[in-house]
Image (spheres, rainbow, N blue to C red):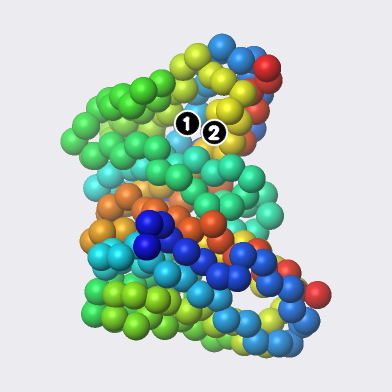
Amino acid sequence: SQQGEEDPQALSIQEGENATMNCSYKTSINNLQWYRQNSGRGLVHLILIRSNEREKHSGRLRVTLDTSKKSSSLLITASRAADTASYFCATAGNTPLVFGKGTRLSVIA
Amino acid sequence: GAGVSQSPSNKVTEKGKDVELRCDPISGHTALYWYRQRLGQGLEFLIYFQGNSAPDKSGLPSDRFSAERTGESVSTLTIQRTQQEDSAVYLCASSRAGANEKLFFGSGTQLSVL
């Protein structure tokens, strides 16, 4: 399966701290994407990193990709209470996007 | 439209009834996906439409599930003879082209089968 698996399943931090979530996958990919979901409804795309890229930044988000280890990490710096949500990685290859089970992030004010 | 629109937002039905869920993708998006998300779980891929190509139905869990899409517009997901295990949020997403582009999601339909 190409499915990404996020780690940890749940993470609780204080406002202002950094949050790191990891994603591992099993097969070759074209790109890897991170999404955010509030309250169990629609997901919002955060960032896409291509297989030939190693690191990408967007605002307070930093994503790394290690294709040799088939893993990615999402770092959220200076977290805010509004960052509380579930975060999913999704891998794109020869099949439609396959999502992991997500990391539930709680940021405590 | 400005975003992906799904209707209804909530649907309560009795076991054994058929339901139809609707998705209006972003105008111009050729790719359309349906996913299912059970409470507290990840997204399960159901079906993928790309332009006029034959849809990828590999994720449909049983023959009670079917979906149609007219051209590059509206899609309907039909679940026949609903079961309690069908209770979930059904999410639709669209993208400009291809299976590797970023997805734009609707707000989902919460289906409850009693």
In the current view of this chain or complex, which residue is farthest to the left? A52
In the current view of this chain or complex, which residue is farthest to the front? B1
Give residue A21's position: percent from left, percent from top: 50, 29
Which quarter of the picture shows residue A11? top right
Give residue B13's position: percent from left, percent from top: 74, 78
Give residue A96's position: percent from left, percent from top: 35, 61
Cα–Cα span, label 1 and label 2: 5 Å
> Mark 2 falls within which chain?
A
Between discs 1 and 2, the one toward the N terminus: 2
Identify the image quadrant of the C terminus of chain B: bottom right
Give residue A90's position: percent from left, percent from top: 41, 47
Q: Residues within 10 Å of mark 2 (few under 14, many from 20)?
A: some
Which quarter of the picture shows residue B100? bottom left
> Mark 1 falls within which chain?
A
Tell me, yes or no, if residue A26 can be seen here. no
In the image, B55: left or right of A24?
left
Tell me the number on the disc at residue A7.
2
The amino acid beneath tag 2 is Asp
**B15 is higher (above) or lower (below) than B27:** below
Q: Residue at x 44, y 23 (%)?
A: A75
Q: Are marks 1 and 2 in contact (CB under 8 Å)?
A: yes
Q: Residues within 10 Å of mark 1 (few under 14, many from 20)?
A: many
Which quarter of the picture shows residue B65? bottom right
**A94 is higher (above) or lower (below) than B83:** above
In the current view of this chain or complex, which residue is farthest to the right? B114
The amino acid beneath tag 1 is Asn
Q: Secondary structure at mark 2?
A: strand
The residue that disc 1 covers is: A22
Q: Residue at x 40, y 38 (%)?
A: A46
Q: Viewer-proximal residue, A22 or B39?
A: B39
